[in-house]
């Protein structure tokens, strides 16, 4: 369930096997042009890992670590939706959540930061 009043947001993957809750909408969302974000359609919101609750069965999530080994991107094992990422060597105080899991009305009005990840 998503709340339009700035309180906690809850989103789900397509099949509902992965549920993610965050305490509030982010101040902005990020759209990156790196190959991973481009191909998954990722639009990111970011919180401290302690502020994010991921509710999924132990075998519901599948990890993917790309070449730079900075983050683990997690996908629903059933529907394939990229739900979130956790840091490996990236700063440990930041975790990314795919905003497409939430109701569009709760984030589409937010400012968009364009990130040139393809140049990293």
Image: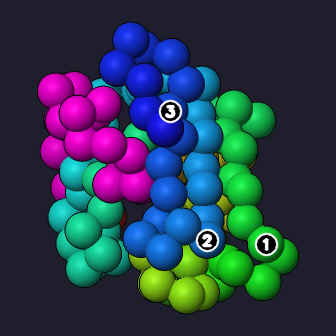
Q: Which residues are magenta?
A: 98-118
Based on the picture, tell me whether residue 108 belongs to the magenta stretch.
Answer: yes
Which residue shows up at 72% across the image and 56% down it? 55
- What residue does disc 3 label? 9
Q: Tell me whether the residue at label 1 lies in contact with that at label 2, contact meaning CB atoms closer than 8 angstroms.
A: yes
Locate residue 64 relative to residue 82 in the image: left or right. Answer: right
Instruction: Find out whether the residues at labels 1 and 3 contact each other: C-beta distance under 8 Å.
Output: no
Residue 63 visible from this viewpoint: no
Q: Residue at x 22, y 26 (%)?
A: 110
> Is 86 within the magenta?
no
> In the rendered structure, which disc, 1 or 2, sits on the residue that comes first in sequence?
2
Q: Secondary structure at mark 1?
A: loop
Q: Is residue 87 left or right of residue 102?
A: right
**Residue 26 in picture, x, y percent from top left:** 41, 27
Q: Earlier in the sequence, mark 3 or mark 2?
A: 3
62 or 21: nearer the viewer: 21
- How many angstroms separate mark 3 from mark 2 (CA)? 17 Å
Q: Which of the two residues, 87 or 74, is positioned nearer the viewer here?
A: 74
Residue 61 picture quarter: bottom right
- Identify the residue shown where x is 34% and y is 20%: 4
Q: Classify mark 3: residues with Cα within 10 Å, few (<14), some (14-19) or many (20+).
A: many
- Mark 1 / mark 3, whichever is N-terminal: 3
| Alpha carbons under labels 1 and 2: distance apart | 8 Å
On screen, residue 55 versus residue 44, left or right, reads: right
Q: CA distance from mark 1 to mark 3?
A: 20 Å
Disc 2 on helix, strand or loop? loop
Task: Determine which of the numbered discs, if any, sits on residue 17 in the image.
Answer: 2
Disc marking residue 57: 1
User: As drawn, is 116 to the left or to the right of 2?
Assistant: left
Instruction: Say how the picture is coloured.
Output: rainbow
């Amino acid at each position: 369930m998503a709340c339009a009043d700035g309180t906690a947001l809850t989103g789900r993957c397509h099949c509902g096997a992965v549920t993610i809750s965050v305490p509030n909408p982010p101040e902005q969302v990020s759209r990156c042009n790196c190959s991973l974000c481009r191909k998954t359609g990722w639009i990111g919101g970011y919180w401290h890992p302690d502020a994010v609750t991921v509710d999924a069965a132990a075998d519901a999530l599948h990890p993917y670590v790309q070449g730079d080994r900075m983050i683990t991107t997690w996908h629903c094992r059933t529907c394939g939706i990229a739900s979130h990422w956790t840091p490996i060597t990236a700063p440990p105080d930041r975790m990314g959540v795919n905003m497409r899991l939430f109701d569009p009305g709760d984030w589409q009005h937010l400012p968009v930061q364009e990130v040139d990840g393809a140049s990293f």
